[in-house]
Image (cartoon, helix red, strand yellow):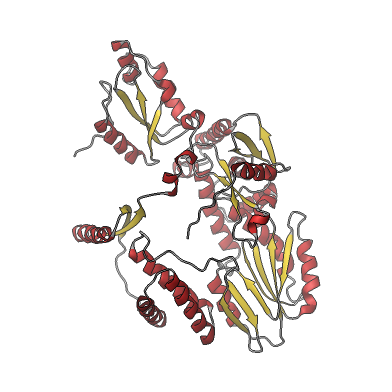
């Protein structure tokens, strides 16, 4: 469920600047993103030229865009009494930065390495925790304690985390690069991130940026190294179970007598790691979305909701496709059945769900029907069936009313009937966005950011007529614009200057417009052809990929 928080702008900026006023960040006199991009591009070309990486690896590591990341500070409104002393969670939005694509690729490589390093340690979620707790039979009463790591990503020493990551890549030979080359690549993708906030530029000199694809896996590698100091001596400290999800942890001890020893070990793991502890109360503790209670037989688990949970869901009469609401109910029922491990707790939670959903306008008879059908699905073993895998195609359609659902069904049926080897996944999307109602709050790109953009279709206008030039480029836009300005009239690429010279017109190089973004070169050329058909263009302005319809 989405929410909208409206804040006082002065207070918001003050909160952000207070966070940035630390030794982890340094204010810059200007934006250095272009210098970093140029340095990284030269590094990749050098590695390719020296045949240290092949074309495939080059494509995976190369930038797909080049915009300066920006900082956002998300208000922690989920805390009790949050607005009395509102705190913020920092988030560096690097979606269109030059480091995003390479960082995403390296994160996948590191996940493979971590799986090879610890094959028995799978991904943790609420369901796996419940399954493991249900299988534990306590000889003695045991004791539960929880912990939270304060400001995890900003506190991770980035250089140390990178060295640990490179150790894994070298150990399992996942990339054909020597250590020095890997250090250079990580230098650009995981350190010294330049970003903007409140029209100022900052450099993060230590810690992992929240928003980088590499931050979660680097923090996991770092934490696992130091956790081993505790887990390798689990018998000594009476540890019967240990679970951690990012920065939240749960420890099962054989006795309360071990609490002080375990706490001392955790506090001494690393000077950057600061822990906040929680201890069971009346044999009960909360972890993730699970409420865990000890008894003489083992553990009873239930759904846990924070005290500030609104206990409301998407309204039944909201303008959202019906199938999404039904699927949400089925997921809530499935979650209840898997987390509540006793019949009593399941019945109580299902009763609560009915009450919350009825308050949100859901028909009670529909809820009863879905509860019954979902329980049947959960208790029925799926029979294995073997089929030829199909290519999946996704596309979205704006949702208006129930007629959209009927239209989606007809389109899906028509395509799959015509092309049997294709599986079509059509999703509906909202026609209106929150940003449509707050036009003055929309993000506006500066001219420098726009000219640094990659993988775009652009339009160059004429100041004296309605004609224009439509082009596309996978390089930074400013490079292509410079080529237009410097081109000679005798060259085939001089369409813009030919128009200016022939009619004595002035070209609006200071107001280039980006029409669309697309990283796939074929799709980008198709977009270029589409726009060429919809604008009056200069003579000779042609696409390299003509549309046939």
Asked which quadrant contains residue 301, the reply is: bottom right
Please name whichever residue, 195 or 479, is drawn nearer the observer in this view of the structure.
Answer: 195
Where is the C terminus found, in terms of image quarters? top left
Residue 44 coordinates in the image, percent (x, y) = 53, 37
Q: Residue at x 43, y 68 (%)?
A: 360
Asked which quadrant contains residue 28, the reply is: top right
Residue 3 to residue 304: above or below:
above
Residue 70 coordinates in the image, percent (x, y) = 56, 41
Residue 114 coordinates in the image, percent (x, y) = 58, 60
Please name whichever residue, 484 or 367, is drawn nearer the observer in this view of the structure.
Answer: 367
Asked if residue 334 can be seen in this view, the reply is no
- As drawn, is 495 to the left or to the right of 130? left
Please name whichever residue, 234 or 44, is drawn nearer the observer in this view of the structure.
Answer: 234
- As drawn, is 455 to the left or to the right of 288? left
Residue 118 coordinates in the image, percent (x, y) = 60, 65
Q: Residue at x 77, y 73 (%)?
A: 259
Q: Residue at x 62, y 53 (%)?
A: 218
Numbered circles on residues, count: 0
- As drawn, is 302 to the left or to the right of 391? right
Asked which quadrant contains residue 532, the reply is: top left
Asked if residue 368 can be seen in this view, the reply is yes
- As drawn, is 292 to the left or to the right of 519? right
């Amino acid at each position: 469920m989405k929410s909208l928080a409206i804040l006082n702008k002065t207070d918001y900026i003050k909160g952000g600047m207070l966070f940035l006023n630390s030794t982890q960040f340094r204010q810059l006199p200007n934006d250095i993103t272009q210098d970093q991009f140029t340095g990284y591009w030269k590094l990749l070309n050098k590695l390719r030229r020296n045949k240290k990486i092949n074309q495939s690896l080059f494509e995976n590591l190369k930038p797909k865009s080049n915009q300066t990341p920006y900082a956002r500070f998300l208000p922690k409104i989920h805390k009790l009494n949050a607005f009395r002393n509102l705190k913020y969670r920092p988030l560096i939005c690097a979606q269109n930065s030059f480091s995003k694509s390479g960082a995403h690729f390296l994160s996948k490589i590191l996940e493979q390495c971590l799986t090879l390093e610890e094959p028995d340690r799978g991904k943790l979620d609420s369901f796996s925790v419940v399954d493991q707790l249900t299988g534990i039979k306590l000889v003695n009463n045991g004791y539960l304690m929880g912990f939270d790591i304060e400001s995890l990503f900003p506190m991770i020493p980035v250089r140390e985390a990178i060295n640990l990551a490179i150790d894994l890549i070298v150990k399992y030979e996942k990339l054909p690069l020597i250590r020095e080359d890997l250090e250079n690549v990580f230098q650009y993708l995981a350190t010294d991130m330049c970003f903007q906030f409140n029209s100022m530029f900052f450099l993060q000199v230590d810690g992992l940026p929240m928003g980088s694809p590499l931050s979660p896996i680097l923090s996991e590698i770092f934490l696992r190294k130091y956790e081993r100091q505790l887990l390798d001596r689990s018998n000594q400290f009476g540890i019967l179970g240990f679970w951690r999800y990012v920065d939240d942890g749960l420890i099962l001890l054989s006795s309360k007598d071990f609490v002080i020893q375990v706490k001392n070990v955790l506090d001494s793991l690393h000077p950057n790691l600061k822990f906040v502890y929680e201890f069971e109360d009346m044999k009960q503790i909360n972890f993730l979305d699970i409420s865990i209670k000890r008894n003489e037989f083992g553990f009873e688990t239930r759904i846990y909701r924070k005290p500030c949970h609104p206990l409301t869901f998407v309204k039944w009469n909201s303008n959202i496709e019906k199938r999404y609401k039904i699927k949400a109910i089925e997921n809530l029922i499935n979650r209840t059945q898997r987390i509540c491990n006793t019949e009593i707790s399941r019945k109580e939670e299902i009763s609560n769900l009915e009450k919350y959903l009825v308050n949100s306008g859901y028909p009670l008879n529909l809820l009863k029907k879905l509860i019954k059908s979902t329980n049947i699905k959960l208790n029925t073993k799926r029979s294995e069936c073997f089929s030829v895998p199909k290519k999946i195609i996704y596309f979205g359609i704006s949702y208006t009313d129930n007629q959209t659902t009927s239209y989606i069904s007809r389109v899906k049926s028509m395509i799959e009937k015509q092309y049997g080897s294709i599986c079509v996944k059509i999703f509906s999307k909202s026609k209106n966005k929150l940003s449509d109602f707050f036009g003055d709050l929309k993000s506006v790109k500066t001219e420098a950011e726009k000219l640094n953009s990659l993988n775009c279709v652009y339009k160059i206008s004429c100041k004296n007529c309605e004609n224009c030039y439509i082009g596309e480029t996978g390089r930074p836009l400013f490079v292509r614009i410079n080529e237009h300005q410097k081109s000679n009239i005798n060259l085939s690429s001089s369409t813009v200057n030919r128009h200016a010279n022939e009619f004595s017109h002035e070209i609006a190089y200071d107001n280039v417009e980006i029409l669309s973004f697309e990283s796939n070169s074929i799709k980008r050329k198709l977009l270029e052809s589409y726009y060429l058909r919809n604008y009056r263009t200069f003579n000779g302005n042609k696409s390299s990929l003509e549309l046939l319809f």
